Image: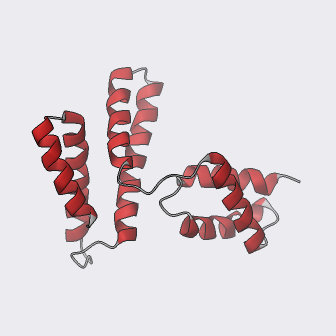
């Protein structure tokens, strides 16, 4: 079942349950899918990778908003963002734990032969391909920088 079909099924269930948080989140995903499918140059269908990227973008937008709301001491708005993130993450592949991510990035560094922070681009390129949908880009970057700066 495609992401769009899953969203429609979940949307109907959320409507019946009168779950406002799920409705809001699912409608946002549905709108993003429609925009992606009708964008200039789009083929009218999304691949599985495109769907994952779309969901990651939705989560990233909400995390950025969450961070801003927390800085501005707006727990009411921060709570809404956290709830929406939880709904959207149900459709993403399972995220790697910090330890698993560190081990996978260390293996990627060994594969690419990276030895210094100057090689971060090589590591990030390989890591984002291999870990697509399984980890946040910020987390990948932070761990890669940390591992490359160690003596």
Across and down, in percent, residue 37 comes to 22, 69
Across and down, in percent, residue 112 comes to 73, 73
* 151 with respect to 61 (left or right): right
As displayed, is residue 34 above or below residue 29?
below
| Residue at left offset 81%, top offset 62% | 116
Q: Nearer the viewer, residue 135 or 16?
A: 16
The colour mode here is: secondary structure
* 145 with respect to 94 (left or right): right
Q: Quadrant of residue 115?
A: bottom right
| Residue at left offset 51%, top offset 57% | 134
- Split into 4 quadrants, where in the image is the N terminus? bottom left
Q: Quadrant of residue 119?
A: bottom right
Across and down, in percent, residue 100 comes to 65, 53
User: Total marks drawn?
Assistant: 0
As displayed, is residue 98 above or below residue 76?
below
Q: Nearer the viewer, residue 15 or 78?
A: 15
- Split into 4 quadrants, where in the image is the C terminus? bottom right
Across and down, in percent, residue 96 comes to 56, 52
As displayed, is residue 121 above or below residue 58?
below
Q: Quadrant of residue 18?
A: top left
- List the single residue furthest toward the right: 151
């Amino acid at each position: 079942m495609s992401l769009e079909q899953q969203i429609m099924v979940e949307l109907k269930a959320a409507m019946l349950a009168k779950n406002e948080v799920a409705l809001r989140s699912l409608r946002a995903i549905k709108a993003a899918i429609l925009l992606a499918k009708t964008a200039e140059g789009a083929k009218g269908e999304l691949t599985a990778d495109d769907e994952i990227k779309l969901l990651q973008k939705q989560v990233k937008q909400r995390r950025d908003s969450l961070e801003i709301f927390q800085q501005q001491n707006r727990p009411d708005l921060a709570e809404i963002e956290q709830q929406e993130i939880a709904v959207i993450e149900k459709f993403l592949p399972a995220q790697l734990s910090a330890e698993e991510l560190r081990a996978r990035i260390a293996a990627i560094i060994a594969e690419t032969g990276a030895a210094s922070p100057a090689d971060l681009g090589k590591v990030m390129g390989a890591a984002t391909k291999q870990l697509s949908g399984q980890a946040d880009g910020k987390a990948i970057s932070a761990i890669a920088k940390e591992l490359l700066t160690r003596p």
